Image: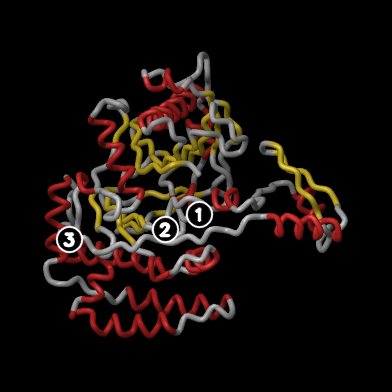
Amino acid sequence: AVRARNGGSLFATCYEPELLAQLASMDGQSMAMDVVGDDVSWRSVDTASVMADLDAKTASAPPKQKLVLEKVPFCGSYTVPLAAFDKGVVGAKARNTKALHESLGDGKIPAWIKLPKSMVIPFGTMEHVLDDAINAEVKRKLTLCESQVDDSSERKLEASLANCRACVAELMPPPGCMDAIQTEMVVSGIAPPDSPERWKKAWRALVKVWASKWNERAFVSLRNVGIAHCDLRMSVLVQPVVDADYAFVIHTANPSTGDTTELYAEVVAGLGEVLVGNYPGRALSFAIKKASPLEAKSGTYLALDARPEVLGFPSKSVQLKIPRDTLIFRSDSNGEDLDGYAGAGLYESVPMDPENETFTDYANDPLVRDEKFRDDVLTKIAQAGIAIEAALDGVAQDIEGVVKDGEIYVVQTRPQV
């Protein structure tokens, strides 16, 4: 939805069969869409006038500025600690994580907001690993596969990119690599894998994040804005997984209405992949009025008498849970959060252990049936979002987090685009 808004494209969901049937009956006709808030209406228009208007707008539009990724060298270390989460070394997720920890330490955000322990495998590490003698054959095969990427059709592109991903999956850790990762985990307060088999799972998860550079959606997205694929670098943010009761995504400025005085958020049971991934159904959605920026900085986060307004109840049929203590390896590329380009969400974040998928009974979930419980949880989520926005200079934020045993954990935040 973020990329659709940035591209000026309509991205809407319809749950009414009658309306879908009306749209289907107009197949092949020229239509105009009018969007007001969350409401979408449409009308038939003359094709010739639409094309003439489009030609006029295209002719008068200024040329698009080509996006260029800054060349990012390897920093010389397989890992970096929180204090070194700096531009040119790690991605925006990690830098924002550092800013949150600094805000927590300075008292700018309340202590009841929990932040997970974090470490990063920096930009250029994959390329450094690829250059090691132990991976000489993998590098030769990957170079060949990249030269054979064929985007003449969707099928050929996916097949040739899959070959690239398969090559990356064969990477082996150079001598000293895993020792460096283990040492930094311990220093960062992250419990490292406790057996050789667990370390193999960790390496596979890390490599899968690197390989997601060659997924079809990301490749096409970079190509369409003129970014050279070879300039993309992937840092990886490593964190313990919180086995959530609920997961949420917050937009501290309502993205549907553009109202900067109102927060909008969505909540689901279990882990957040059900919310941000391609799982059918609706999340619980709500909006709430914010206090003024000055009030938020002083610790008053909600407007007077503000309560969460539920906009939609959840209908997702599944939830995800993690069966044991584990880690997640989060993609954090240099191609995300650029001016004029929403690259977030194009690359994979991979848990060491697969999630368990179970049925969700929202009818008996207190988030739905217990109004006081729901108001308490949603209010606390909203307060966390507004507190973080205030701590980060009032810039609207796109925040991901979870609720566990009544505690709020913020996993990541980025400027809302």
Apparent side of residue 303 relative to residue 356 in the rendered image (left or right): right
The residues tagged by marks 2 and 1 sit, at their Cα atoms, a distance apart of: 8 Å
Residue drawn where x is 35% and y is 43% of the image: 411
Image x and y of residue 192, in percent:
17, 54
Image x and y of residue 31, in percent:
81, 54
Image x and y of residue 282, in percent:
58, 44
Residue under label 1: 341
Secondary element under disc 2, as helix, strand or loop, is: loop
Q: Decide: marks 3, 1 in contact (CB < 8 A)?
A: no
Q: Quadrant of residue 385?
A: top left
The residues tagged by marks 3 and 2 sit, at their Cα atoms, a distance apart of: 21 Å
Q: Quadrant of residue 293?
A: top left
Q: Decide: marks 2, 1 in contact (CB < 8 A)?
A: yes
Q: Amino acid at mark 3?
A: Ser
Q: Residue 77's mark?
A: 3
Secondary element under disc 3, as helix, strand or loop, is: loop
Apparent side of residue 413 relative to residue 171 in the rendered image (left or right): right
